[in-house]
Image (tube, grey):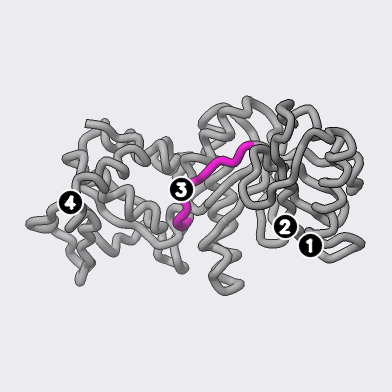
Amino acid sequence: MRWILRMGEVILKSRPVRRFMRKALERHICAQAEIRGARVAVRPWQGLLFLDLIEGEESAVEDALLHTFGLTSADSLTAIEVDPAKVAAAVIAKAPKKDGATFAVQCKRHGDRGKWTSQTFAGAVGAEILSLAPHLKVNLGNPEWPVRIVLMPDEVGILGERIVCQGGLPTGVQGTVLANLQSERDYLASWLVMRRGCRLSFTAESKPELAELVSLWDPYHKSDIWRDNLATAPGPGHIGEIWAIVGDNLGELPDMEGKMPIATLEPLAGWPENSLEELRQKTECSE
């Protein structure tokens, strides 16, 4: 099984920063899959990532991707020859049976341009589908059956159901932040800075159940082995160096001798309750 992964914000960075963040993201994806009982291989190509399942369950990989910061989406992918007739034959079983049902071929090209453009290939696949299922009609704006494909130089990928991921930046690429996890709101605030690429370091007083929730998003906290494999920072010599403290309503700061000035992060300031409820759903945290 293969997935095509999109990185979003990482792609906007300069080449050296993009490479640093991508490598951190690749390690994180592999770790997230492994702690869920799967083994995967990740390779970059043309601003995308391809993930291949080597061992384990597809559901474990999909759960790992849902809990990985730095990805915007993931699509399962079935590779097929660059041939409109073969693509149409591969997807036709999913065509709606109702007379007059609508469809559209949604094609995106990646890599060097060859014989086909995305538009000409989509048109050719659409024509082949109509020859196999003449009861269908084309509706490019709002189709009942969207046929999603990616056109690459040597193959076509037929895309399955899209997984909408968390976005943001890979965990750890923005350094380490101290978190005192005493309440749900402390956890929610910490989750928001994790999504911006920060790794959390817990105070001794942090509640174990909230720290365990954090480990769903960052395997770094699972064991010393994962700490060694996933340790990263935005520059040499900065791994583990705390530059900020995060929480819901920060009062007296802990003694950080030699670490001043230290930033205070209170990302929940001003959030209304309806937005907090949406955040709880995202973070799998419920009262």
Label 4 crowd (10 A; few <14 / some 14-19 / many >=20): many
Residue type beneath disc 2: Trp
- Look at label 1 and name its amino acid: Gly
Task: Give the Cα separation between the discs numbered 3 and 2.
Answer: 21 Å
Q: Residue furthest bottom?
A: 14
- Element at badge 2? strand
What is the quadrant of the C terminus in the image? top left
Residue receiving disc 2: 45
Question: In the rendered structure, which disc, 4 or 3, sits on the residue that comes first in sequence?
Answer: 3
- Helix, strand or loop at label 3? It is loop
Distance between the alpha carbons at the discs numbered 4 and 3: 21 Å
Q: Amino acid at mark 4?
A: Asp
Residue wearing tag 4: 248
Q: CA distance from mark 4 to mark 1?
A: 45 Å
- Marks 1 & 2, CB-CB < 8 Å contact: yes
What is the magenta range? 161-169
SS at circle 1? loop
Q: Earlier in the sequence, mark 3 or mark 1?
A: 1
Dot 3 alpha-carbon crowd within 10 angstroms: few under 14, some 14 to 19, many 20 or more: some
Going by the picture, which residue comes out furthest to the left?
Answer: 252
Dot 2 or dot 4, earlier in sequence: 2
Mark-to-mark CA distance, 1 and 2: 9 Å
- Per the image, the residue denoted by label 1 is 111
Residue at image point 37% right, 41% down: 282
Residue occupying image coordinates x 64% and y 38%: 144
Instruction: Report the amino acid beneath label 3.
Output: Gln
Q: Residue at x 40, y 64 (%)?
A: 238
Percent of width and height locating residue 128: 88, 42
Mark 1 crowd level (few <14, some 14–19, many ≥20, 10 Å Cα): few
Task: State which mark lies toward you, 3 or 2.
Answer: 3
